[in-house]
Image (cartoon, helix red, strand yellow):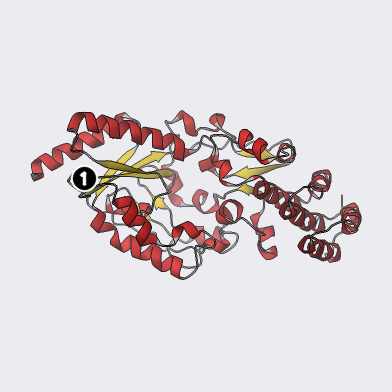
Amino acid sequence: MPQAQSATTAAQIKQLAAQMGFDVVGITRPQDLVEGERAIEAWVGEGRHGSMQYLEDYKKRRDRFYSGVAELKSVLVLGVNYYSPSANETPQHLAGRVARYAWGKDYHQVIRQKHEALIEALQKSIGLSFQARSCVDIQPLPERFAAVQSGLGFIGKNTMLLSQKYGPWLFLSEIITNLELEEDAPFEGDCGTCAKCQKVCPTGALDEDYRIDARLCIAYLTIEHKGVIPRELRPKIKGWVFGCDECLTVCPFTSKSKETRWPEFRPESGTGEWLVLEQLFEIGSNSMHERTFENTALLRANRKQLLRNACIVLGNSGKREAIPLLVKAMSDQAALVRLHAAWALGQLPFDEAKTVLKRFQRTEIDAQVSAEISVAIKTESVSEAT
């Protein structure tokens, strides 16, 4: 494709994407993503990805994805601003905090539908020769690096893309195509001496400049990690029941924040900013869990994971009102929930919490849970704190 035509087509595609609601659009080439791919492979090779096995075998998965487009030439990178301001209201009930990206509908579903509409529109205007595939987070593509290469921002020390227009609040997605489009110039920038995100991270997950250890990240622990959360990390989770925004909200680039134009990502379209913990413990089955959180990102964590997280939040609350909920959790069908409920009871500064633990110690049949109960009973507490 001649350069002039390539530039014209790129401009037309960007205009169409903007009309469909995408806030930022950039273009790069697949060969320009090699550095980002190597960085992911090195990160996985160090084990920093934790139990996220889908990040392994990167090259095989990438080649399989790319093979869906013959003569792949361009990568269209699209960004959607999902920021909604906090209501700054203290919940009347015991509640857990939800990361901002999950307040509304599941972005995978919403953006995938927009991709399908955009691809269909391009096929009509360009013809049968046009080929494209959609990538909304789950495909093997280094999307933050792709966003940098296509001029949308730079990767900060919190490892998030930082946009001059929208700060750290962009959902990124890509469309790969056989169209040869004029690419954008890479964005050049860095955080300089700022280290606010590293200092605020409760678990020290941002342990090196521009790098993260997922195994310590609260977002990973509460969403991706399926098993027992290490005891030493549980107090550091504080009130987060799903995800974490600490390193985003402290970033100076939050000054660029603008309220999203997409109604699907506003709090009223999903669960919102808080989950009432009492309501979580009323979810008695996996099917009920799926119905409750249908079309939201909360389904990324299954029922027992979310209740595990809720137990940790209750243990960190220091409140007497948490005890009845934890008593219910101690009778849950999932050992994972009972284990974290035992820990939580051990954290509460009330003698009655220890009394509950001793009662359940006599009937618990799971060895891991029994061991956790024993540790919790031995934990020092302030007697009958008010």
Quarter of the image with the N terminus in it: top left
- Front-most of residues 54 and 346: 54
Rendering coords of residue 254 (x, y %): 45, 46
- Indicate whether 212 appears above or below 312: below
Q: Which residue is painted at 29% across and 61% down in the image?
A: 34
Mark 1 secondary-structure assignment: loop
Dot 1, how many residues are within 10 Å of its Cα: few (below 14), some (14-19), or many (20+)? some
- 209 with respect to 150 (left or right): right
Rendering coords of residue 224 (x, y %): 56, 53
Q: Which residue is painted at 80% across and 48% down in the image?
A: 326
Report how many numbered discs are placed on residues in the image: 1
Residue 196 is at least partly visible in this image? no
Rendering coords of residue 101 (x, y %): 51, 42
Q: Which residue is painted at 51% across and 54% down in the image?
A: 247
Rendering coords of residue 290 (x, y %): 61, 37
Farthest bottom residue?
A: 46
Task: Report which quarter residue 9 is drawn in.
Answer: top left
Task: Report which quarter residue 18 is drawn in.
Answer: top left
- Front-most of residues 130 and 143: 130
Q: Disc 1 residue type?
A: Asn
Residue at the disc numbered 1: 178
- 128 with respect to 119 (left or right): left
Q: Which residue is painted at 51% across and 64% down in the image?
A: 213
- Front-most of residues 1 and 251: 1
- Front-most of residues 243 and 332: 332
- 195 with respect to 236 (left or right): left
Residue 330 is at least partly visible in this image? yes
